[in-house]
Image: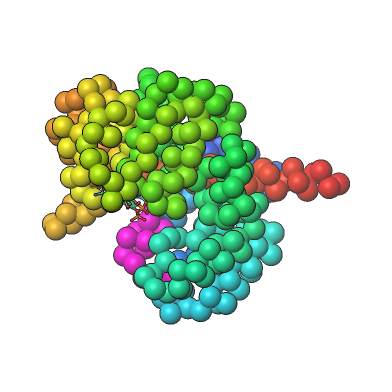
């Protein structure tokens, strides 16, 4: 089965549009802010996609691009400005930061400046902690996208799921192998899958005998950013394969981490690249903006 992320995202888009229309009817304008430090072309492209998706569903995205040499204080000042702005419901810092700027130890400090109530991509320590303890405030958009893809691979199509309500045994008895341990994708994904009952194997670039581990996966997720990493002999027969990777060939063609042609003969369900996890991630972010607006409104209502 092909897990058609683009088609599922298009279905979800209709729902998000209804929500934004309803919000605007009641005089609330859903809006989020994105901060980009530097001019990494991939990050610029990701932000353009988010902006295009936001326009499509009638959410406003404001963005600021800061030079790669921006100081820690400047980035923090920008975050604080958005924290203080009640018309901004969500804040996103587009990662990765440019290499070496800001220094590694300052990055956590910067991200932790985001108001956790506006932290729509789960970048703050507070929200990562909440996710880890099984009480997520927001799921990182890519994590939500992968969960949605897994659900579709189980035959549930574009079904909307409130992942916070999912029983911790949803994936019990299943082994999920996650390749990649980054702070923004692999690690939170492994944690979320654990909280949903899966037996999780988490691999990184130094993992030995990767093939013998990946072959144990009923669900195999690759988020390494290495084109052609997952070959057919690394996949268990009838496994579900979710490809988070987004790489460019020398000719500029977008490809994932998985050898799609070969692996699709073995997998029970598989996501393509492009058109798989990517569009699901962007629509998941929009859903998180809606959630942030609703949370903000109920906080105000509770105070009254
Ligand atoms: P990253 O570079 O921060 O982390 C990569 C991880 O993969 C690291 O833990 C590294 O140790 C591991 N890794 C690298 N080579 C490996 C190998 N040969 N074997 C096993 N593990 C290996 O990257 P990231 O930010 O987590 O992104 C990963 C990929 O996902 C990239 O291609 C990125 O473009 C893509 N991405 C896609 C989406 C989406 O929505 N589709 C969102 C975010 C990231």
- Which of the two residues, 232 or 209, is positioned nearer the viewer here? 209
x and y percentages locating residue 214 in the rendered image: 27, 34
x and y percentages locating residue 284 in the rendered image: 48, 42
- Which of the two residues, 223 or 14, is positioned nearer the viewer here? 223
The quarter holding residue 277 reads top left
- Which of the two residues, 95 or 233, is positioned nearer the viewer here? 233
Please say whether residue 43 is one of the residues in the magenta stretch.
yes
- Tell me which residue sits at (25%, 30%) in the image: 215
Residue 247 versus residue 294 in the image, above or below: below
Please give the range of residues in magenta.
37-49
- Tell me which residue sits at (50%, 29%) in the image: 196
x and y percentages locating residue 100 in the rendered image: 39, 73
Residue 56 versus residue 32 in the image, above or below: above
Q: Is residue 52 left or right of residue 210?
A: right
Residue 145 versus residue 73 in the image, above or below: above
Farthest front residue in view:
208
The quarter holding residue 2 reads top left
x and y percentages locating residue 4 in the rendered image: 32, 32
Please say whether residue 97 is one of the residues in the magenta stretch.
no
Residue 14 visible in the displayed image: no
- Tell me which residue sits at (59%, 47%) in the image: 129
Q: Main secondary structure of the magenta part?
A: helix
């Amino acid at each position: 089965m092909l897990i058609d992320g683009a088609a599922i995202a298009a279905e979800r888009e209709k729902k998000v549009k209804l929500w934004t229309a309803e919000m605007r009817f009641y005089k609330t304008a859903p809006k989020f802010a994105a901060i980009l430090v530097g001019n990494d072309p991939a990050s610029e492209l990701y932000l353009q996609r988010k902006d295009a998706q936001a326009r499509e569903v009638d959410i406003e995205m404001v963005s600021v691009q800061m030079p790669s040499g921006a100081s820690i204080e400047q980035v923090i000042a920008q975050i604080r400005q958005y924290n203080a702005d009640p018309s901004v419901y969500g804040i996103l810092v587009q990662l990765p930061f440019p290499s070496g700027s800001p220094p590694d130890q300052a990055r956590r400090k910067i991200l932790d400046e985001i108001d956790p109530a506006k932290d729509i991509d789960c970048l703050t320590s507070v929200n990562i902690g909440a996710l880890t303890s099984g009480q997520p405030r927001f799921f990182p958009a890519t994590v939500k996208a992968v969960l949605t893809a897994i659900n579709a691979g189980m035959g549930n199509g574009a079904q909307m799921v409130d992942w916070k309500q999912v029983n911790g045994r949803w994936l019990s008895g299943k082994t999920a192998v996650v390749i990649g341990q980054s702070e923004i994708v692999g690690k939170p994904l492994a944690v979320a899958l654990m909280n949903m009952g899966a037996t999780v194997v988490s691999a990184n670039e130094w993992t030995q005998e990767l093939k013998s581990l990946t072959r144990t996966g009923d669900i195999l997720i690759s988020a390494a950013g290495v084109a052609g990493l997952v070959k057919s002999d690394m996949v268990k027969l009838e496994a579900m394969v979710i490809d988070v990777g987004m790489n460019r060939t020398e000719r500029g063609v977008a490809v994932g981490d998985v050898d799609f042609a070969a692996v699709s003969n073995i997998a029970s369900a598989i996501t393509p690249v492009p058109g798989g996890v990517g569009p699901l991630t962007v629509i998941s972010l929009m859903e998180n903006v809606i959630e942030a607006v609703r949370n903000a409104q109920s906080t105000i209502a509770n105070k009254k």
